[in-house]
Amino acid sequence: MTISETVNASARSSQKSSGRLPPGDVEFYHREGYALFRQPVFAPQQFERLRAIFEENLARYGHDDLDTMHLRDARLLEFLLSDEVLDLVEPVVGPDIGLWSSHFISKPPRVGKATPWHEDSAYWNGLISTQEGICTVWLAMDEATPENGCMKVIPGSHANGFSDYEEVDRAGNIFPTQIKASQFDANRAVYFSLQPNQCSLHEARMIHGADANTSDTRRAGYTMRYFPTTSKVHLERIPWPHKIWLARGRDHAGNRYENRNKMTTKRSDDETATRS
Ligand SMILES: O=C(O)CCC(=O)C(=O)O
């Protein structure tokens, strides 16, 4: 284990599981690499506001250009930095949380491409000091089913994070590569059917993907991604313009956050923590 992995592990083991995930689900997440939250994440009106922002951006940019939308539309930060989401993330990431990224992944009816089997960690290799502890909240914007291409995962596959990949047909897939079939047993896949405003959480090293949308209904999800701030984000190595936010707690790794000087932590409710 590297030093930063050790710090991450100890941050997690000392955390309270007082958030929105029951302790059993937290333990399941660490063992299997994912958790399902089949309750409304946001209050109905708040979710409708998020959906309206999503529809506006979809109409403006199209299905294929919705990555890191919060860098273009600051209204999304209300949701990405909300207690509703961070209270789900804290029990698995720990008390000190950074906002790593976000992406609306929208698959239109009938023509939506597949998300090939992959590990997020393989795509982020070298951009952050460790992939351990990074968590994605996948919020269903539409109902997600096996027919319209809901998320699918291989339980317990988050030990490695760097499988062998091969090229895949770009026309039918949203990424250019997939994990070689010999590396895992696809028959063990678990499909995440979700209602709108419910979510799943998965660990960055988890093997996961989604089938093409062969149904008559759209499948859109909002991926909200978080890292433990014991990890160092190498912004200078990220080959696209990127920014990170301190979402909760404090930094341990000398990261440069967009909101570094204006963070109010939830834990110290009345206290505004000014950071230099
Ligand atoms: O929504 C999808 O199709 C895939 C999502 C995904 O790969 C992720 O959240 O990391």
Image (cartoon, rainbow, N blue to C red):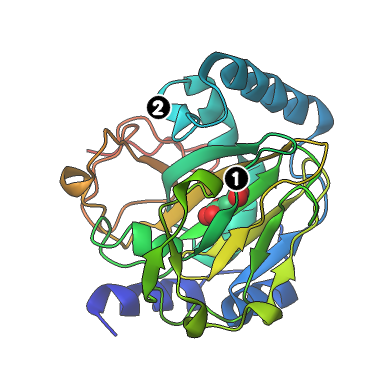
Tell whether 248 sits left or right of 125: right
Residue position for label 1: 113
Percent of width and height locating residue 227: 42, 56
Q: Position of residue 261 (x, y in %)?
A: 30, 32
The residue lying at 83 percent from left, 31 percent from top is: 44
Three-letter code for the amino acid on which mark 1 is drawn: Lys
Label 2 element class: helix
Q: Residue at x 25, y 80 (%)?
A: 2
Q: Which mark is residue 71?
A: 2
SS at mark 1 in the image: loop
- The image position of residue 158, as x and y in percent, is 50, 77
Q: Is residue 246 above or below residue 124?
A: above
Other-residue count near label 2 (Cα within 10 Å), few / some / many at <14 / 14–19 / ≥20: some
The answer to whether residue 8 is left or right of residue 185 is: left
Q: Quadrant of the C terminus?
A: top left
Left or right: 87 as drawn, with respect to 174: right
